[in-house]
Amino acid sequence: MNLIKQIYKGTLFPAESKYPTGTEYLHMRKELESKIERLNTMLDENGRQLLEDVLTLRVDMDSVTDVDTFVFGFKIGAEIMLEGGVKIFL
């Protein structure tokens, strides 16, 4: 099935399949989780809530950046195809 049909039928979700699974990423994620746990034990309830708010804001910011990066990459890919003379038949 071609990509456009997959997107239309809801079987392709680029945003949900972008997370790395390599050992370097998994190591960093584990280290981050460990440090967050340590920090949580040092903080009172207000500090834990502030940490949660900061982390949530960071995730939201990363999400906006990811969308912009995806769109930019898609546009660059399309421009490369056009520049290379790729014929698109509709």
Image: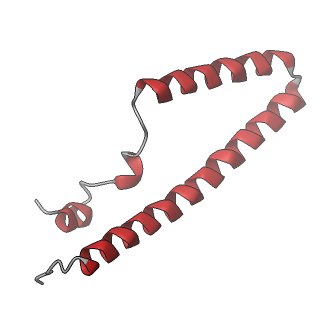
Q: Nearer the viewer, residue 59 or 69?
A: 69
For residue 53, side relative to residue 79 (left or right): right
Q: Residue 1 at x, y = what percent?
A: 10, 59
Q: Is residue 62 above or below residue 54?
A: below
Classify residue 7 as left or right of residue 35: left
Which of the image's four quarters has the C terminus? bottom left
Q: Residue at x 46, y 68 (%)?
A: 72
60, above or below 25, in the image: below
Residue depicted at x 14% and y 63%: 2
Residue 70 rendering spot, x and y as whole percentages: 44, 61
Identified at 17% across, 77% down, the residue is: 86
Q: Is residue 72 left or right of residue 59?
A: left
x and y percentages locating residue 19 in the rendered image: 43, 40
Q: Which residue lies at the image location 26% right of the left edge and 59% below the top edge?
A: 10
- Which of these two is toward me, 60 or 84? 84
As drawn, the residue found furthest toward the front would be 84
